[in-house]
Image (cartoon, rainbow, N blue to C red):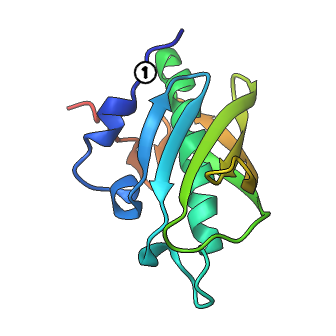
Amino acid sequence: MSQDFSARLNELPEGWLQAMGITITLATSDEVRAEMTVGTEHLQGYGIVHGGVHCGLIETLASIGAALFALPRGQSVVGLENNTSFIRAVRSGAKLHAVSTPITRGRRTQVWEARVLDEQDQIVATGRVRLLCIEPDQAIAGEQVRGVLHPAKD
């Protein structure tokens, strides 16, 4: 089985995962899992989880898995497309868990799918993310890629 990077990700002092209260429970190049409890910070005006939270969770899990697959090849990844479907509304206090697995992992692109489920394992949202594999000499937004799983070279 691939090395699990969940502890390293959960130790980050800041970032989207921490802001959203998401705990990564497994992070390998073959599967990424997470859990979260819905709070008021996740809600839209009708008192249900904002769709952007589901999109962000799905993209985050897919990106982590894709990065873990690309890093040994010296590559980074960046999302190109996120298609998320909202299946069931959930409110504050709900405990959610999510899982993402690869559909295809090529030399230049990867596609990962994810499911967000409630405590009864009912699907809350599903999504598919297409990611571009970035070579070490490529820049994103004018700068070399940096991050917790891909530290900047000094």
Expressed as whole percent of the image width and height from the top left, the position of residue 109 reads: 71, 33
| Residue, disc 1 | 4
In the rendered structure, which amino acid carries the disc numbered 1? Answer: Asp
| Residue 120 visible | yes
- Residue 86 placement: quadrant: bottom right
Q: Work out whether residue 127 or residue 67 is closer to the camera in this orientation and state it.
A: 127
Image position of 30 with respect to 127: above or below: above
- Residue 125 placement: quadrant: bottom right
In the picture, measured across the screen, residue 78 lies left or right of residue 151, that is right
Residue occupying image coordinates x 51% and y 37%: 64
Residue occupying image coordinates x 40% and y 41%: 145
Residue occupying image coordinates x 61% and y 78%: 48
Expressed as whole percent of the image width and height from the top left, the position of residue 46 reads: 63, 89
Image position of 154 with respect to 38: above or below: above
| Residue 109 visible | no
Expressed as whole percent of the image width and height from the top left, the position of residue 83 reads: 77, 57
Q: Work out whether residue 47 or residue 32 is closer to the camera in this orientation and state it.
A: 47
